[in-house]
Amino acid sequence: QVQLVESGGGLVQAGGSLRLSCAASGRIFSINLMGWYRQAPGKQRELVATITSGGSLNYADSVKGRFTISRDNSKNTVYLQMNSLKPEDTAVYYCNAALFGTLGLRAYWGQGTQVTVSS
């Protein structure tokens, strides 16, 4: 059973920083794409950032220059460093991984972690 477990959310003032982590566990052969998505109340889930196994990066325009995604392949872990946070960054942040496990290539989601930015 593959699991993605996120940590690092919380409450922070505008201009502050948070670092999210997401560790994948279980019988995993390889992980292709890892990423972060977020969903604010009343809105659809949206992409924040992704990183491939080779290190190629993709960011939403709204977070470019403020957020940094990285991964540690030896730990099957992806990180999201969030700086200069704004109230509009408030959302539940979800980790996503496209990986090869015993069920073949599948996408998995974490349970989500709340990020709240106060003004």
Image: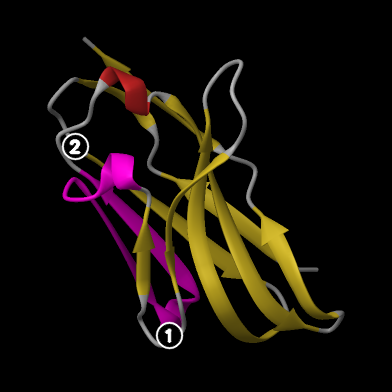
Q: Quadrant of residue 7?
A: top left
Q: Which sits in the foreground, 57 or 79?
A: 57
Q: What span is in magenta?
A: 61-82
User: Gap in Å between the C-alphas at discs 2 and 1?
Assistant: 25 Å
- Compared across the picture, whether 57 is left or right of 65 comes to right
The C terminus - image quarter: top left
Q: Which sits in the foreground, 59 or 6?
A: 59
Q: Which sits in the foreground, 43 or 109?
A: 43
Q: Position of residue 38 (x, y in %)?
A: 51, 38
Q: Residue at x 22, y 31 (%)?
A: 85
Q: Residue at x 54, y 74 (%)?
A: 33
Q: Is residue 77 magenta?
A: yes
Q: Residue at x 19, y 37 (%)?
A: 17
Q: Position of residue 87 (x, y in %)?
A: 29, 18
- Mark 1 lies on residue: 74
Q: Is residue 84 magenta?
A: no
Q: What mark, if any, has residue 17 been given in the picture?
A: 2
Q: Are marks 2 and 1 in contact (CB under 8 Å)?
A: no
For the image, the number of numbered tags is: 2
